[in-house]
Amino acid sequence: MSAETPPILALSGVSKTYGAVRALSGVSFAVGRGEVHAILGENGAGKSTTLKIINGEVDPDQGEVRLSGRLTSTAERAQGDIAMVHQELAVFPNMTVAENIFVGRMPRRGGRIDFARMRARAAELLELFGLQIDPGTILGQLTPGQQQIVEILRAVESDASLLILDEPTSGLNNLEAETLMVLIRRLRASGHTILYVSHRLHEVLAIADHVTVLRDGQFIETLAAAGLCEDDLIRRMVGRNLEPAATTASATLSDAPLALKIEGLTMPGAFTDMALELRRGEILGVFGLEGSGAEDFSQAIFGIVPPVSGRMELLGKPVTDLSPAGLMRRGMAWLHPNRKEAGLYMERSIADNIAAPVLKQLSRFGMVNRRATKARAQEDIRRFAIRVPGPEGLPKQLSGGNQQKVALSACLASQPEVIVLNEPTRGVDVGAKAEMHDAARREAAAGRAVLVFSSDLPELLRLTQRILVMRSRRLAGEVQGTAMTEESVMALAAGNR
Ligand SMILES: Nc1ncnc2c1ncn2[C@@H]1O[C@H](COP(=O)(O)OP(=O)(O)OP(=O)(O)O)[C@@H](O)[C@H]1O
Ligand SMILES: [Mg+2]
């Protein structure tokens, strides 16, 4: 970069405090025009806060933000040539897909909104991701992944020269994530600058020109991405070498009692003839690509969408009340794949959230024992290294990854015998992921049974002893032991063998 062309973005000495939490202290770095610049750091390191300051949503306590060399105020940046895709969806569920894409700048013709043009352009954009969705569809009817794509398309359509993407792929399937990579490269080629945050380090290495590392709210360094490997990034994020990830010993569990048995479970249109046997002490994985039926199967197991035929036995007894409440009473817990939708009560304290499933157990004479709730929360905050101001804080004050940790501890708080985890480590950093995997292993070692649905295949390979693979809405096969590799699972899931 020559001296005459200042960087498109430069932060210097930026600090932000929330109450007692110092989210950022004295952060300074610069981003060159036309590059993809990744910001990396553990959960709670300050990535989203940095991005919101750049986007003019959050006012820093101190420091300067320059755009192309010019000092800017927060209000100016909010109005400026910057578009952001948020880590937690920021969409309008009651408006149509087209309205969501064009919100605030709908095309006009003769003073009126040009709906025809809007719909045509929206359809074109959706086609980029191969989505055959009518732009007139109400957004709330789409899956969370599709809603995320709509939010990405809104940013793309704004044609802002600085595009900020905060974990845009966390809700996307692999194919959609790859499409986004192609789109980002195309945007870069046409002169856009992209700020990118993701815990999927291979994505970062595939796409970033530079990487800026934050740790505990402080700037660590900015480096060129070329030649770096995932371990280099991890070391810089955590400031130490991580122990090699533990893998789960594949003990023979064939004599352990059955915790969950499913036979001939069928839901027309969703899945057919599903079966599984899960024993105490076992961690069993279920993997399927988008449209394989794995998601529906998981919901059916918890009675969210009741299957039409089949049999289920929980801890040796037939399930007669196949409903979430009925199953929870019988010792099952189910971690929701989307923490914001149903995993957490955003307006209740962290302590209440962790205790929610056990409020009955903790309350005597119908009164909640606040001290017990708080003590339990404090224990989990320590166990999972949740970065919080305290148990009385609200989940919405936590970073995304730390919210996910609260959701998992809430799920485990009722001491369930059968634990169904859906996308347990979405948006969670590498270190915290290892801690959450350890927690699942501890549950299994204590004789509980764990069933994991995850689209993160490396996670399943590391965590589970056996993986059931679904394809075309039925069971495609099962892999275990040394046969459990990325290739063998993908071959079953994609059907090319
Ligand atoms: N509105 C808020 N009120 C109080 N504390 C906040 C608020 N927003 C963020 N924080 C705190 O600031 C710190 C940095 O949070 P931030 O969301 O920037 O982290 P992050 O790096 O994006 O993490 P993640 O990878 O989990 O998304 C965290 O300790 C968080 O709890
Ligand atoms: Mg964040």
Image (cartoon, rainbow, N blue to C red):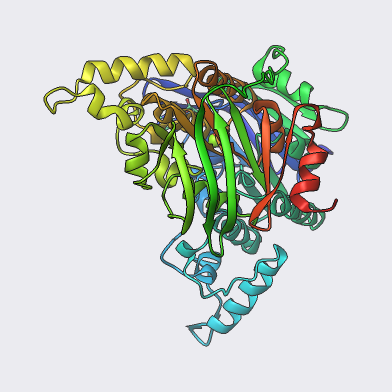
> Residue at 78% of width from left, 21% of height from top?
232
Image coords of residue 237 (percent x, y): 67, 21
Q: Of 193 and 6, which appears nearest the observer?
A: 193
Image coords of residue 118 (percent x, y): 58, 77
> Residue at 66% of width from left, 36% of height from top?
10
Q: Quadrant of residue 367?
A: top left
Image coords of residue 138 (percent x, y): 47, 69
Q: Can residue 472 be seen in this view?
A: yes
Image coords of residue 486 (percent x, y): 79, 37
Left or right: where does residue 413 sit relative to residue 56? left
Q: Of 208 and 254, which appears nearest the observer?
A: 254
Q: Of 202 and 32, which appears nearest the observer?
A: 202
Q: Quadrant of residue 130?
A: bottom right
Q: Can residue 63 be seen in this view?
A: no
Judged from this view, the residue extending furthest toward the bottom is: 110
Left or right: where does residue 374 sit relative to residue 24? left
* Vertical order, 449 against 34 (above or below): above
- Quarter of the image that includes the N terminus: top right
> Residue at 61% of width from left, 72% of height from top?
122
Judged from this view, the residue extending furthest toward the right is: 227
Judged from this view, the residue extending furthest toward the left is: 365
Left or right: where does residue 21 sit relative to residue 432? left
* Vertical order, 126 against 372 (above or below): below
